[in-house]
Amino acid sequence: MPYPITPFVGMKPGEKNDQASKVKLGTTFTGDDGHVYIYAKASAAIAASTVSVLTEPAMTMAGGAGDWTSPAFALANGDEAWFMKTAI
């Protein structure tokens, strides 16, 4: 997982949260790898490293033909995590 180059306070990239949000849904940062990351909630189970679709304004993700990639670990419905914008 990259290091953030835009400042933010809260949950570290590469972690998942299955409890109350530590970070506001929709929070973004740019990583040192050039990708944008967004904090969102899984609206269904999502396998590791799956292309995902963002639904706004709810800031929920579901596996499908979208612009984001889930983290390198599986997410259960309701888990929150950082998703990577697939294209730079």
Image (spheres, rainbow, N blue to C red):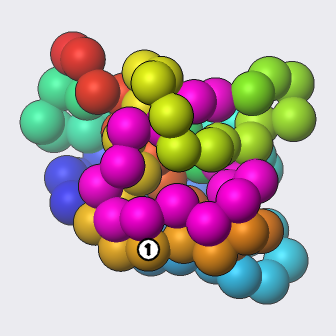
Residue 10 visible in the snapshot:
no
SS assignment at label 1 = loop
Q: Which residues are magenta?
A: 40-54
**Which quadrant of the figure has residue 71?**
bottom left
| Residue, far top | 88
- Residue 7 lies in the magenta-colored region: no
- Residue 45 lies in the magenta-colored region: yes
* Left or right of 58 on screen, residue 14: left
Residue 56 visible in the snapshot:
yes
* Left or right of 28 on screen, residue 3: left
Q: Nearer the viewer, residue 67 or 1?
A: 67
Q: Residue at x 80, y 23 (%)?
A: 56
Q: Residue at x 47, y 23 (%)?
A: 66
Q: Amino acid at mark 1?
A: Ala
| Residue, far front | 64
Measured as percent of width and height from the top left, residue 82 is found at: 48, 53
| Residue, far bottom | 19
* Left or right of 55 on screen, residue 48: left
Q: Nearer the viewer, residue 80 or 13?
A: 80
On screen, residue 67 above or below 78: above
Q: Residue at x 85, y 77 (%)?
A: 20
